[in-house]
Image (tube, rainbow, N blue to C red):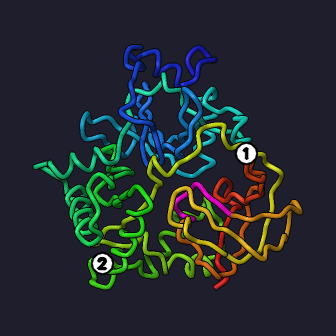
């Protein structure tokens, strides 16, 4: 730190023209977008509800002269930060003012001030750029081919689709995967049926065991579950797999018209940490980020003795994790959800700690 008491963020920010922070967002930020702050750092936007003048987001790429990622537009080098604990540690050291105890979410949140945002990367706009591009890299070309195959099979408009992840920021590598995002419940149903067809036609394929073992190694630092349970849950998913030798991951997000709450309309209160066993009664929200599973026959194995009716997650890895009628075991934060005039209810949130999990009992 400069002068012993300045964060690296403050140092970077002091070198940037203050005018760059006066950003007019092209649209409200939502899940799947990326933010670039005035110092060049890139952040994953989380969820669809954000406090006034701030955006809930997590650090993803930071400028680093020794970084392995090179941004195509300007040659600037970056390094990727992925494990949750590493993200928290980095933000705590370099952006401590971004960590706030949010009274609505009832937890410590990472929230980026809008005045610090230099650019919002929009997935649907990035896809349009690639569709009209003439000189595409191999990764970009594969992404366009996959998007075209899904669109044709599902019969959905281009406006309901986008590209996120490293392709959105231009920080992809030769072996990067393809992250496609889709908006709206109607689009989700059509695309999911298309995925079934594309698997049957051989356009897409599921992971092999060796590829699943690689995925397990990548995810284990954040979600420490037994290997056998991981393999059983992951091998049946359609939202991830391989296309032309390249990994893909699909994400579904509710459209604006389907989000009927604003910041503060729903409040969350943590009541402890617990583990439950239950039966999934409704998995219709299992494909979206955030995802949710309605529960019945809930048994508290550890933690607060409260009537939990739902398990939810803001992380894509917990989508498509269980089906209606299946028994599950899950561990995570227990919280009370308050939304008038509805009755309060309790839910379990997974994905915030490496000890969190949601597993079907197959």
Residue 182 % position (x, y): 38, 58
Residue 284 % position (x, y): 55, 69
Residue farthest to the front, as pictured: 341
Q: Is 358 displayed left or right of 215 in the figure?
A: right
> Does the magenta segment cover residue 324?
no
Q: Secondary structure at mark 1?
A: loop
Q: Which residue is denoted by mark 2 in the rendering?
A: 198
| Above/below status of 113 relative to 337 | above
Magenta region: 311-318
Q: Residue shown at 63%/85% (left/top)?
A: 362
Q: Nearer the viewer, residue 350 or 210?
A: 350
Is label 1 or label 2 in front? 1
Q: Is 195 displayed left or right of 361 in the figure?
A: left
Classify residue 334 by image quadrant: bottom right
Q: Between marks 1 and 2, how big is the CA–CA gap?
A: 43 Å
Estimate how packed mark 2 is, as few (under 14), some (14 to 19) or many (20 or more) residues with alpha carbons within 10 Å.
some
Q: Which residue is denoted by mark 1 in the rendering?
A: 340
Q: Residue shown at 33%/53% (left/top)?
A: 163
Estimate how packed mark 1 is, as few (under 14), some (14 to 19) or many (20 or more) residues with alpha carbons within 10 Å.
few
Residue farthest to the left, as pictured: 134
Q: Residue shown at 41%/65% (left/top)?
A: 188
Residue farthest to the right, as pictured: 305
Classify residue 77 by image quadrant: top left
Sequence order check, earlier mark of 1 and 2? 2
Q: Secondary structure at mark 2?
A: helix
Q: Nearer the viewer, residue 320 or 240?
A: 320
| Above/below status of 59 relative to 290 | above
> Does the magenta segment cover residue 317?
yes
Quarter of the rendering occupied by the N terminus? top right
């Amino acid at each position: 730190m400069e002068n012993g008491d300045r964060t690296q963020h403050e140092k970077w920010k002091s070198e940037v023209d203050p005018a760059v922070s006066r950003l007019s967002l092209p649209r409200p930020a939502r899940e799947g977008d990326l933010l670039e702050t005035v110092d060049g750092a890139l952040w994953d936007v989380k969820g669809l509800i954000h406090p006034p003048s701030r955006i809930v987001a997590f650090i993803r790429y930071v400028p680093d002269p020794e970084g392995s990622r090179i941004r195509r537009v300007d040659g600037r080098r970056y390094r990727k930060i992925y494990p949750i604990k590493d993200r928290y540690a980095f933000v705590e050291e370099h952006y401590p003012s971004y960590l706030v105890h949010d009274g609505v979410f009832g937890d410590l949140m990472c929230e980026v001030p809008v005045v610090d945002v230099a650019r919002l990367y929009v997935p649907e706009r990035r896809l349009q750029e690639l569709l009209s591009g003439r000189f595409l890299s191999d990764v970009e070309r594969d992404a366009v081919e996959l998007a075209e195959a899904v669109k044709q099979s599902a019969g959905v408009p281009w406006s309901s689709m986008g590209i996120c992840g490293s392709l959105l920021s231009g920080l992809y590598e030769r072996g990067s995967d393809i992250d496609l995002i889709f908006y709206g419940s109607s689009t989700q149903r059509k695309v999911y049926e298309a995925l079934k067809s594309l698997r049957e036609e051989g356009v897409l394929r599921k992971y092999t065991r060796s590829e699943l073992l690689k995925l397990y190694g990548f995810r284990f630092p954040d979600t420490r579950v037994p290997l056998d349970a991981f393999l059983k849950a992951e091998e049946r998913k359609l939202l991830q797999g391989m296309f032309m030798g390249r990994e893909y991951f699909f994400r579904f997000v509710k459209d604006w018209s389907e989000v009927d709450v604003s910041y503060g309309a729903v409040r969350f209160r943590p009541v402890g940490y617990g583990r439950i066993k239950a039966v999934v009664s409704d998995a219709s929200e299992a494909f979206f980020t955030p995802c949710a599973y309605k529960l019945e026959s809930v048994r508290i194995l550890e933690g607060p003795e409260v009537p939990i009716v739902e398990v939810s997650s803001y992380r894509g890895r917990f989508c498509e994790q269980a089906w209606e009628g299946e028994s599950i075991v899950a561990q995570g934060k227990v919280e009370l959800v308050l939304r008038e005039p509805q009755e309060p209810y309790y839910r379990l949130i997974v994905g915030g700690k490496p000890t969190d999990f949601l597993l079907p009992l197959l």
